[in-house]
Amino acid sequence: MRLEGKGIGWRYGNGPWLFSDYDIAIQPGESVGLIGPSGSGKTSLGRLLAGYEKPLTGEVSVPGRSPNHTGYDPVQMIFQHPERAVNPRWSMARTLTEGWSPDAPLLDALGIKDDWLRRYPNELSGGELQRCCIARALGPNTKFLIADEMTTMLDAVTQAQIWHTVLEIASKRQIGLLVISHDHLLVNRICSRIIPFG
Ligand SMILES: Nc1ncnc2c1ncn2[C@@H]1O[C@H](COP(=O)(O)OP(=O)(O)OP(=O)(O)O)[C@@H](O)[C@H]1O
């Protein structure tokens, strides 16, 4: 039951094709790195796999995705800029529980403090907000996680702590990970396979 893109192609408007007839597959429980130059289309590919957009050619298939894309999607994506991934008018308590209710051990493991839940997104730092976005994405129905420069804005210690938690959960629940990053060291350390892109 893998996440698969087959023969997929994408471009914006009449611009150049970022990729075409592209194949990618991620197995449950594996951690795959996607490395390529800036602007080559990695985020765009992630968005197609996560179901935000339908590919212009080819197909994305995901076990358990509802045909009309309602409800909690089995492919969750974390973006580099968490402030663009949340509703600024929702409290953090509401934001965190949008798709499921993260339990106390997970909030603790990600260093999320009770006090943050009463605040709004603009009252948290980028790193604090990102931890909340990660908790939100780790619901029990998550089968694949696309981490797009997920920890780029964090210091090395926090980065290591967050990856430790995410990798532990992914391994326990056999979540497949696609790690989009410019950080070769990080990808080499946490991924069993690297796909060069662009
Ligand atoms: N909504 C959009 N409309 C038009 N062009 C876009 C849009 N989003 C992205 N692009 C362009 O598509 C190209 C690929 O962008 P994308 O963000 O997928 O690349 P990337 O490989 O993830 O880059 P980076 O490593 O810098 O994050 C870029 O040239 C970008 O300017």
Image (cartoon, rainbow, N blue to C red):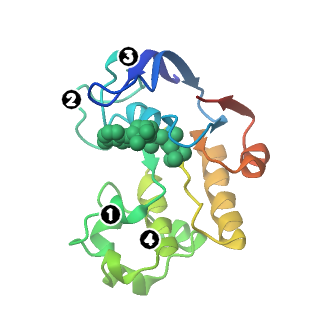
| Residue labelled with disc 1 | 97
| Residue labelled with disc 2 | 68
| Residue labelled with disc 3 | 59
1 vs 4, front mark:
4
Question: Looking at the rendering, which quadrant does residue 115 occupy?
Answer: bottom left
Q: Earlier in the sequence, mark 1 or mark 4?
A: 1
Image quarter for ligand 1: top left
Q: Is residue 146 visible?
A: no
Q: Is residue 133 visible?
A: yes
Q: Earlier in the sequence, mark 4 or mark 2?
A: 2
The amino acid on which the numbered mark 2 sits, given as a three-letter code, is Asn
The amino acid on which the numbered mark 3 sits, given as a three-letter code, is Glu
Q: Earlier in the sequence, mark 2 or mark 3?
A: 3
Q: Earlier in the sequence, mark 4 or mark 3?
A: 3
Q: Give residue 49's position: percent from left, percent from top.
A: 43, 31
* Left or right, 154 with reference to 58: right
Q: Is residue 67 above or below residue 20?
A: below
